[in-house]
Image (spheres, helix red, strand yellow):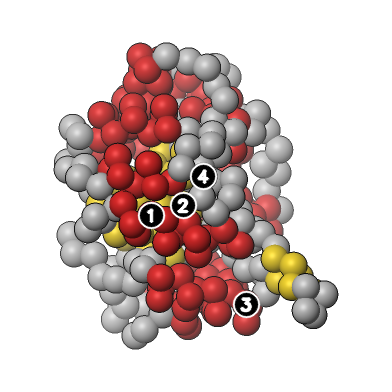
Amino acid sequence: MTLTYPLLLDGGLSNELERQGCDLNQKLWSAKLLESNPEAIILAHLAYLEAGAGCIITSSYQATLPGFMAIGYDEDSAKELILKSVQLAEEARSRFLSLNPHASKPLIAASIGPYGAYLADGSEYRGDYLISDQELWDFHQPRINLLNDSTADLLACETIPGFHEAKVLAEILKNVKKPAWVSFSCKDGQHISDGTPIEQCAAYFAHHPTVFAIGVNCTSPEFISPLIQSIKTKSGNKRIVVYPNSGAVYHVESKTWSGLSDLPSCELMVKEWMDLGADIIGGCCGIGPEQIKAMGQSLPK
């Protein structure tokens, strides 16, 4: 597999599903649709591919073995649903390529959300769950192993809020064969959600054998530029991945707000992030196909 940079990611899966009329107000979030409405997931992926995304992220963020088993699935059925997230992304890619036969083949990144996503209590933005290394290992390893053996191109450990969890993931990822990125949720321009400096996190993964990119996701766009700068100082030769949420920035001079929902601001921000060293750029919650298309227009051809 050859990665070409800059690489454009997709946007928020949940907001595109909600735009279709899907109700995600339940503990499994978009993962619930893996069984109840798989076509909606395919169409959401397809919308981002048609907007120009060169990589789509699977609907497995909140798809976990304990999450499915807690609502009555047996272990084998839970595993099948997690793998189905990759199959649906492949179906979307197949449909896209059949309609665009001269397009480059998009990549599929298998989403691995944090323990806090399984809790569904917002703790993926705090990192304050008090559990042991072994409990985190037992939670993450089965899903990572499953997705590592899937046909996905990459592993995406995303929205990681705490250094404790990141260190456990680092150990598990030493044993995978797929390239992986690790991206953190951050509370400001210098710290991840649990207060650890982002520089410390970047330094920890700088020489990791399978993690090829370090970065930030589901974080306000106003913090992305300083976070890129901080990551760059400690990340060695690793690529930098950023895919913020829509956020909003207040401009004192004009007394107006802008964020990644504002298309001109979207293009300007992407250019700035690339100039600072970002290699992989996309969007998270609140960022839709229109914004991804605008981002793509800012990337060099």
Amino acid under label 3?
A: Ser
In this view of the protein, which residue sits in the foreground, 82 or 137?
Answer: 137
* Rendered view: 182 above or below 284: above
> Hey, what amino acid is under mark 4?
His
- State the CA–CA distance, disc 4 to disc 2: 11 Å
Q: Nearer the viewer, mark 1 or mark 3?
A: 1
Give the foreground label among 4 and 2.
4
Q: Which residue is mark 1?
A: 231
Task: Indicate the quadrant containing the C terminus: top left, top right, bottom left or bottom right.
Answer: bottom left
- Foreground disc of the pair 3, 4: 4
Q: Are marks 1 and 2 in contact (CB under 8 Å)?
A: yes
- Identify the element where label 3 is drawn: helix
Apparent side of residue 178 relative to residue 68 in the rendered image (left or right): left
At a point 40% along the width and 76% down the height, the residue shown is 275
Q: Earlier in the sequence, mark 1 or mark 3?
A: 1
- The residue depicted at 44 percent of the width and 46 percent of the height is 198
Type of amino acid under label 1 = Ile
Q: Secondary structure at mark 4?
A: loop
Q: Where residue 105 sits in the image (x, y, percent)?
A: 28, 68
- Look at the picture and state if 205 lies above or below 106: above
Badge 4 is on which residue? 191
| Label 4 CA crowd tier, 10 Å (few <14, some 14–19, many 20+) | many
